[in-house]
């Protein structure tokens, strides 16, 4: 019976893993929330249309133009020269590179045309324009 009693100076062999698992789960949840928040991209108010289909394809690149004229490629701000060189690299890697142009409804038409001219110059023929679908029966 005396062999079952542990003295105070003996090492404690059991490890409680519950707090470690709690910490791992909290870190996992925080990582998931931060990752999904960073993927959303740049918010713009898209123009409205009645015939809007889903144009998602693999390896598609998104160009966003905000109301103030800022240009983003896949949620990263770029200048027109950077856009031209980056799209040229993507086009070299994927000859049938699809693009989606997402512009704010208040965007100057000149910026949209500059982006379309770059796509035309690089021979990018698959270009989609992002719009919002109007509700059926709406004006």
Image (cartoon, rainbow, N blue to C red):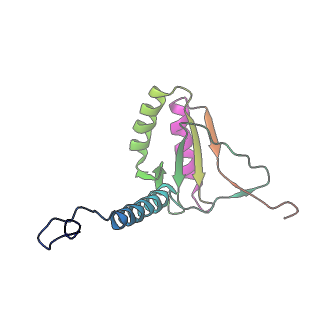
Which residue is more in the foreground, 29 or 136?
A: 29
What main secondary structure does the magenta stretch of the protein show? helix
Horizontal and vertical percent for residue 93? 45, 27
Residue 138 in the image, given as x and y percentages of width and height = 85, 64
Residue at the image point whose x is 52% and y is 57% from the top:
40
Query: Is the C terminus in the top left, top right, bottom left or bottom right quadrant?
Result: bottom right
Query: Residue at left 52%, top 25%?
Result: 95
Magenta region: 105-124
Instruction: Please state the horizontal and vertical placement of residue 121, each as a whole percent of the image.
Output: 51, 32
Residue that lies at the very extreme toward the front in this rendered image: 1
Is 123 within the magenta? yes
Residue 122 to residue 69: above or below: above
Query: With 128 as the anchor, is 41 left or right in this view?
Result: left
Q: Position of residue 70 (x, y in %)?
A: 47, 57
Q: From the viewer's perspective, is residue 116 above or below residue 94?
A: below
In magenta segment, residue 47: no
Q: In this orientation, which residue lies closer to the viewer: 92 or 113?
A: 92
Where residue 11 sits, quadrant-wise, is bottom left
Farthest residue to the left: give it.
9
For residue 4, side relative to residue 43 (left or right): left
* Quarter assignment of residue 45: bottom right
């Amino acid at each position: 019976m005396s062999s079952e009693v542990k003295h105070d100076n003996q090492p404690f062999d059991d490890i409680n893993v519950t707090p470690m698992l709690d910490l791992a789960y909290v870190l996992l949840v925080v990582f998931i929330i931060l990752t999904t928040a960073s993927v959303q991209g740049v918010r713009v108010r898209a123009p409205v249309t009645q015939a809007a289909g889903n144009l998602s394809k693999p390896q598609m690149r998104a160009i966003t133009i905000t109301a103030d004229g800022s240009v983003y490629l896949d949620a990263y701000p770029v200048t027109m020269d950077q856009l031209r060189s980056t799209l040229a690299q993507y086009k070299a890697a994927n000859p049938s590179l699809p693009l989606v142009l997402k512009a704010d409804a208040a965007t100057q038409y000149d910026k949209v045309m500059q982006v379309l001219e770059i796509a035309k110059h690089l021979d990018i023929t698959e270009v989609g324009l992002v719009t919002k679908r109007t509700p059926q029966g709406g004006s």
